[in-house]
Amino acid sequence: MRELVADLVRDALADAVRAGDVALAEVPEPRIERPRDPAHGDWATNIALASAKSAGMNPRQLADLLAARVADHPDVAAVEVAGPGFINLRLSASALQRVLTEVRAAGGTFGSLDIGAGERVQVEFVSANPVGPMHVGHGRWAALGDSMARILSHAGYSVQREFYINDQGVQMDVFAKSVAARYLELAGVEGVEFPEEGYRGAYIIEIAREILADEGDGWASAEPAEREHHFKEKAYAQVLEHLKNVLSGMGVEFDVWFSERTLHASGPDGGATPIERAFERLEDAGHLYEHEGALWFRSTTFGDDKDRVLRKADGSYTYFAADIAYHADKYDRGFDRVIDIWGADHHGYVKRMEAAVAALGHEGKITLVIGQLVNLFRGGEVVRMSKRTGEMVTFEDLLDEVGADAARYFFLRRSTDQPLDFDIALAKEQSSENPVYYVQYAHARICAILRKAAGADTADTDVDIAATARDLVRTEAPLYLLDSDPELTLMRKLAEWPEVVEISARQLAPHKLTRYAEDLAQTFHQFYTQCRVVDPDAPDLTAARLYAVDATRIALATVLGLIGVSAPERM
């Protein structure tokens, strides 16, 4: 609809120039926006204000001239000039009715765009350390990353989802020592000293118990280094598989699981490691220097507040060194753009990463999204501990209690730059107060209407809703009958969807989908309350309203699909 209005306004100005009514060397691209107050119309443009000086005209005079040229178009119901020269337009019923046809013709691709034009984008998200269960913040980032990927794909981008496995470094050694200590305790070894910095969760005991059950107590007499190495690999594999299963349970699948270890490994010919090769690139470009035995990256060249150490004086690498090599690898794989979703504790890391990407020759091709914390509540009361284990509530605990749909939806209801208050009791509630239930109920209600209209509205009847809609809804339905306020309001809301997709894709803002889903559900519920859909005494109006109802079903299912939430046919 935005493009339709832009074309109307542009053509009106071009016609005025050709007729000699306006003197402009070039017709500018009109800026089209929605008025803040819907009472002022569907769309507004300031083209008269923007062009008046070049045309040597008063803005209001130019606006009046353009409004007169637009007013007779069949897609325009009303046009008025406001203030110093704004033009407000209201679309005709016939223009809005066409939206219904477009929705049903497009099906699940409704609102898909080509703004990405096949651009290759990688979205890296979650990337939890494989040393224990994920916290609820990881769940939020999982929902964010997966929904972003879905939105970008819908907008025409070629998207790959990636999980970076932090399987190298001190935390893995501490993990191994923790499992080994618990194993020795379970094996009856006395005087076992648990590492002071060790992981103390009950899951460590469970891992050790499984190893003892599978392999016996023979490792108790093994050399500590050999035992810890074995337990590290065994426990790491268990935790990684667990992470994959939990994420899959929320409908989040990754195309690539990238191991940090590979960045420290030499090539098959024994050549330089990826980290060393990344250093060579930066060295050749003049971005590295040595100071007090350490190797430094001159990140201040690219706007960072200070230079960063890559290799310490003792020869060990910093985490940043591996991150640089990892991102060099991403661009080597041909991605045009990289999106990283990081935890709230990574705010100070953004500038240095942007600097590194710029130094590698890919300036401006990375977007760093910082996911804020999740605060759990239950009926308004703060929740910190799991009822089952008495420990921190994990992402898996939350999924088990509220389900994947509610978890994903609630995780996406706020902008990424805002902390999220997640009320478990509300997420489980089956009422209109629960937003995901409210939206899903709108879809289920539509399916019930279609079943009833088809004479198949019984609990034990398994009906293919899509097939029912194809058979039931008349292609030639008299849509011109849909001209009441509730009907026009519903069509206006459907017409907004492509715009919502574009904004969400450009701003990486999945929360706009949940807002739209709730608005669309509310608009449909109001329509249903005021408009009788199936009326035996008005077959033509019934046909038209069934057409509108089915278009709404398709749109709701499409929105929920990009959120990653199911669209139930019964509730």
Image (tube, grey):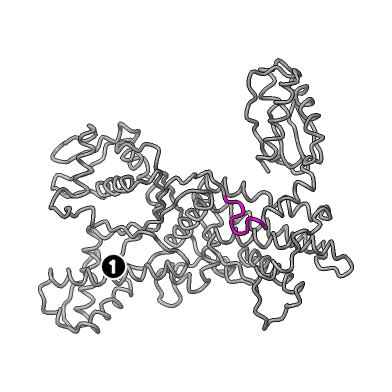
- 223 sits left or right of 86 in the view: left
Residue at which label 1 appears: 199
Quarter assignment of residue 218: bottom left
Q: 444 or 213, which is in the foreground? A: 444
Label 1 is placed on what type of residue?
Tyr
Magenta residues span: 105-112
Quarter assignment of residue 568: bottom right
Residue at x 30%, y 72% (from the top left corner): 238
Q: 28 or 169, which is in the foreground? A: 28
Determine the main secondary structure of the stretch shown in magenta: helix
Tell me if residue 571 can be seen.
no
- Which element is circle 1 on? loop
- 527 sits left or right of 212 in the view: right
Q: Position of residue 188 (x, y in %)?
A: 18, 84
Residue at x 33%, y 36% (from the top left corner): 304
- 445 sits left or right of 145 in the view: right
The N terminus: image quadrant: top right
Tell me if residue 225 can be seen.
yes
